[in-house]
Image: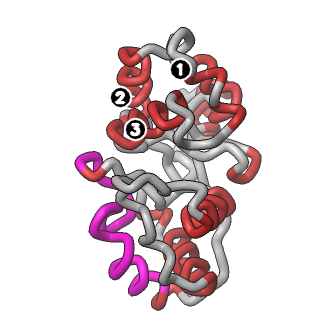
Amino acid sequence: DVYGPCAACHGANGEGGKGGEYPRIAGQPPAFTLFSLKQFQERKRKNLPMFPYTEPRELSERDMKDVAAYLATISLPTKVPEFKDSDSSLDRLLMMERVLVVPRVDGDVRKGKATYRKACAKCHGPTAMGRDEKRAPLLVGQYPDYLRRQFDAFKKGERGAEADDPMKGVLDPLSDQELTDVLAWLTSIQEDAQ
């Protein structure tokens, strides 16, 4: 199983963990996952824990495509499932392990939605589910602490610094409060997403 080593940090179902120290990767558009893995492999995206796992001898091009395709098929419900009397305790436990609810962020949801639509929706989609053709990840259902770290990395030029990166400079005009409001909106709509 090619995904096996990834599960140690990102979880058996790609749910991530430790409150966003490890991001959710389940449900990500395959083009984004493949692009990210290649960036780690080529050291264009700095993340020391990812480097050994993305070495070409550890993760071939075919493996990257397989992992990306596999992760795209995983949906993580945001509500407790309805159990049947016939469900065993193990089945119930496994169903609950797939439930992912990220914490809400305080902020102005209305302003966050407006900022998102103006600055983010073109690539990440109207409901923040990501777009494969744009290599844009899903944002809804992602840990807000992780997203905040990525926002900061983009603003500092630690991510998206390459001339052809579609995120280059996108967040620069946005204030910290505007980004917090975007997170507030994203976490307010998570129940509508899977």
Q: Which residue is mark 3?
A: 35
Q: Which residue is mark 2?
A: 69
Could you say which disc has been placed on residue 3 in the image?
A: 1
Query: In the displayed structure, would residue 164 be above or below residue 84?
Result: below
Residue at point 52%, 40% (across, down): 44
Q: Position of residue 22 (x, y in %)?
A: 67, 43
Q: Position of residue 31 (x, y in %)?
A: 33, 39
Residue farthest to the right, as pictured: 18
For residue 12, what is the image quadrant?
A: top right
Q: Is residue 41 magenta?
A: no
Q: Nearer the viewer, residue 121 or 98?
A: 121
**Do callouts 1 and 3 mark residues in contact (Cβ within 8 Å)?**
no
Q: Amino acid at mark 3?
A: Phe
Q: Amino acid at mark 1?
A: Tyr
Tell me how far mark 1 sits from mark 2, CA to CA.
11 Å
Query: In the displayed structure, would residue 127 be above or below residue 81?
Result: below
